[in-house]
Amino acid sequence: MLKLNNLQELYELINNGKKYIIINNNILNIKEYIVNHPGGDNVLIDSIGKDVTNEYNDIGHSKSANNILDTLKVGIINLNNKKQNISENKYYNIYLQIYKLKYYIKVLFNSIYNKILIIKYKYFSNKLFQKNIKNNFIIKEKHKINNELIKITIQNNTKRFFNISILKHIKIYNDKNEFRYYTPIKICKNSNSIELFIKIYENGKITKYLNNLSINDTIKVSGIYGIYNYSNDIIYQNNKPIYLLLSTNIYIICAGTGITPFIRLLNHNNMINRKINIFNINKNNNYIYFNEILNKFNNINYFTENKKFSVNELDNFINSYTYKDLVLYCGPDELGNDIEKYFNNKSIYNFYKL
Ligand SMILES: Cc1cc2nc3c(=O)[nH]c(=O)nc-3n(C[C@H](O)[C@H](O)[C@H](O)COP(=O)(O)OP(=O)(O)OC[C@H]3O[C@@H](n4cnc5c(N)ncnc54)[C@H](O)[C@@H]3O)c2cc1C
């Protein structure tokens, strides 16, 4: 049973996603009950974090309603007087408003900054990437990591300018004009080079072709694609800022080569001060890469055949969600769908599949 001394302690729990109300100094968890409430769910949602003893008594509830209250009780709270109630409620709302204001100011500045960049880019006539125009890149480096994985560096030898925003990807073509998407793990604007981390499929149209190429061979590349984009500390989806990226908690779930979009994101300076929780899922220990980047973050959890990942595992790591939380996933579709279902069941909507 919870024993709270004031509303401030309650607001901290509400802030962490708990759906508690107070009636007669009892703390009631209404999370499951909201949908069953005969007066509609809005009434209860508006009551979260409040002492609604007077409202409850005014309506005059039945004995069975009182019995329901007993089943919802999770603790007691010491409310000395109403004065404290009002002032602390104000504090909670002000905190939320400041948070939102900070967010909007940041988005505004960012959009002005991006507009300037777009104009600058438009008049940069010598730019390399234009939609579906293929460019020649030369294979500069190729490292076989194991039987299935290669790391390659490709370079464009012209003096043309390119930039690929974090979370965006490129198309690589084979000699039959078939293509697949790949996400750079590093780009170097000075040398016009792109580093890629690729899993080879024995019968794969593009990866088999890439695996057979040698240093100094040429490949065709076009860009830039993707609905997500990271710029100046905000993630965009179809050019709309994803609400709440000022989030302090970011959960990153990646499986296999699904780690690629996160490498540049995690390497970004602004990420290091954030509370980042990483779930890295791989076949076995030999397939864990980028440890030096991942291990910079305090909450990194590796899963392999020996320590299997299942969506319910997430319960052990994520025990509360707030408006400050954001979950990003990249990996096989089947796992992504399971994870999406898990978050939908918990009514968490700040979940994005990259
Ligand atoms: C936005 C985006 C970014 C991507 N970034 C990367 C990246 O950085 N690195 C990377 O290695 N891949 C990445 N991929 C996957 C990549 O685009 C190809 O799908 C993959 O390389 C297989 O292409 P392929 O032509 O060799 O195989 P295909 O000819 O398409 O497939 C041949 C066989 O290989 C198997 N296969 C193919 N893809 C998969 C898969 N994903 N899971 C399980 N089995 C599969 C299947 O059995 C299939 O029948 C990305 C995909 C997307 C959509």
Image (cartoon, grey):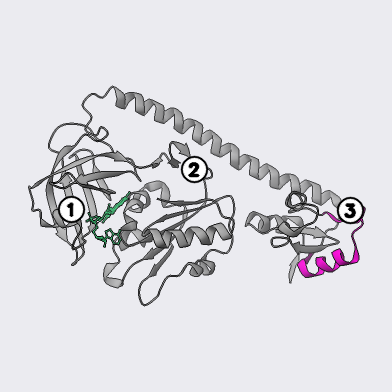
Give how far across and how far down residue 336 sits, in percent: 43, 59
Give how far across and how far down residue 256 sits, in percent: 32, 62
Mark 1 lies within 8 Å of ligand 1 (Cβ measured): no
Q: Secondary structure at mark 3?
A: helix
Q: Nearer the viewer, residue 282 or 244?
A: 282
Residue of label 3? 54
Residue of label 2? 242
Please say if the residues under marks 3 and 2 sit with CB atoms less than 8 Å apart: no
Which residue is most to the top? 123
Q: CA distance from mark 3 to mark 2?
A: 39 Å
Quadrant of the drawing holding the N terminus: bottom right
Residue of label 1? 152
Question: Is 29 situated left or right of 102 in this image?
Answer: right
The magenta-colored residue range is 52-76
Is residue 313 at all visible to an observer of this figure?
Answer: yes
Amino acid under disc 2: Ile
Identify the residue at horizontal 36%, vertical 58% (top origin): 331
Q: CA distance from mark 1 to mark 3?
A: 68 Å
Mark 3 lies within 8 Å of ligand 1 (Cβ measured): no
Q: Secondary structure at mark 1?
A: strand
Please say if the residues under marks 1 and 2 sit with CB atoms less than 8 Å apart: no
Q: Is residue 64 magenta?
A: yes
**Image quarter of residue 32:** bottom right
Amino acid under disc 1: Ile
* For marks 3 and 2 on the same chain, the one whose residue lies earlier in the sequence: 3
Residue 105, placed above or below residue 171: above
Question: Is 266 situated left or right of 203 in this image?
Answer: right
Question: Is 127 situated left or right of 21 in this image?
Answer: left
